[in-house]
Amino acid sequence: MKAARLFGKNDLRVQDIPVPEIGPGEILLRTAAASVCGTDIRMLKHGHAQATPESPLVIGHEMAGTIERLGEGVTSYRAGQRVCVAPNYNPTPSRLTVGGEGHLDPNYRALGIHEDGGFAEFVRIPALAVSQGNVFPISDHVSFTEAAMIEPMSCVYNAYEKAGTRPGDTVLIIGAGPIGVMHAKISRLAGAGKVIINDVNAERLEMARSIDPSFITIHGDVRAEIARLTGGAGPDVIITACPVPEVQTLAVEIAAISGRIVFFGGLPKDRAVVPLDANIIHYRQLMVTGTTRQSLRQFQAVLALVTDGVLRLEDLVTSTHPVEETEKAIAAMANATGLKSRLEFAA
Ligand SMILES: [Zn+2]
């Protein structure tokens, strides 16, 4: 099979390798679509502990396809079934896994990060992931592409739940990449009054508006525009969907009284200490939090929204590639020329 394997920093090779063997309790997935994530860009750019010349890693953790084969003892699925796969699973039970938050457990494992992932024609789904319910059957009308994007969308849903966005809220999203647009979509769905997106990239703001003309975009002076749009009150919810420290400082300064701020985008390690005005947080009663990954419950919730047709994701895709062009697909996203890149596999 063809697979995009990471050997180290800036060393991604598409190779012909054997189709993975599966053992008892495992599933062999025939990949139909896989989407590219910021994590893939970072893994290629900086390398990754799990991807070495001795032990290269098939990257990609946003995937959907059909079940090719079932390992011994797998009874809750059938061959030929259309599914998408949540990538994070837990080898050991813990306080967090029991509480439904295994994605936050430091010992979590992920397809495409610790184990071979979705940028390949076939993927071995480990028995633990199968038994923990990471394989989600999808309805016939849900496309493989949308199913692959349940993963990033459910990370976004995690932030939405933390922010507690309510009807009428003004939401500001800083960062108009695919993730920013996903935040805008869920805010719209949650009944936000104004959904405002800010970015330095005018082209991406244009793309966001073409997806939903109700999105308000800010390209210039954020403070002035937010003051104007909110009558000086500030946004009720602010999501930082970019890896820029200054944006976190700004979010605290412009949030409304009782505002909720979610630091969604991680920061470069050497720039992660950020000045935040603690008196503003105190006197304006702000809630400042972060989110990462998603629980299986959140994954399931987003799958339901997509299945019911109230949340569309396909319009985020701006470039499509065969697996041979994985590096191109990653570059298209890294250059911020479009929104989401996807790999499509021949049926
Ligand atoms: Zn992702």
Image: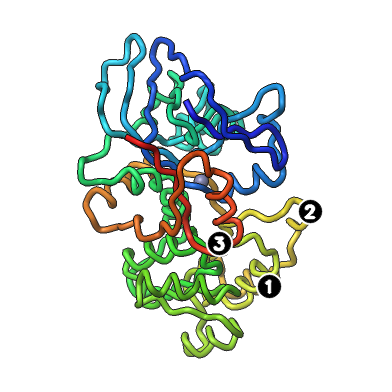
Give whichever of discs 2 and 1 has the lower sequence position.
2
Of tags 2 and 1, the one toward the viewer is 2
| Residue 105, x across and y down, in percent | 56, 34
Give whichever of discs 1 and 3 has the lower sequence position.
3
Q: Residue drawn at (65%, 42%), measured in percent from left and top?
A: 43
Give the residue pinned by disc 1.
Answer: 279
Q: Secondary structure at mark 3?
A: loop
Give whichever of discs 2 and 3 has the lower sequence position.
3
Placement of the C terminus among the 4 image quadrants: top left
The numbered disc on residue 241 is 3
Q: Residue drawn at (58%, 45%), measured in percent from left and top?
A: 327
C-alpha distance separating marks 2 and 3? 18 Å
Depicted 200 relative to depicted 150: above or below = below
| Residue 112, x across and y down, in percent | 54, 34
Q: Residue drawn at (54%, 74%), measured in percent from left and top?
A: 198
- Horizontal side of 338 relative to 211 (left or right) equals right
Q: Secondary structure at mark 1?
A: helix
What amino acid type should be assigned to the residue bearing mark 2?
Asp
What amino acid type should be assigned to the residue bearing mark 1?
Asn
- Horizontal side of 222 relative to 132 (left or right) equals right
Rate crowding at label 3 as few (under 14), some (14 to 19) or many (20 or more) other CA atoms within 10 Å: many
Query: Which residue reaches farthest right?
Result: 270
Depicted 32 relative to depicted 242: above or below = above
Give the residue pinned by disc 2.
Answer: 270
- Residue 302 visible somewhere in the drawing: yes
Residue nearest the viewer, comparing 276 with 306 = 306
Tag 1–tag 3 contact (CB < 8 Å): no
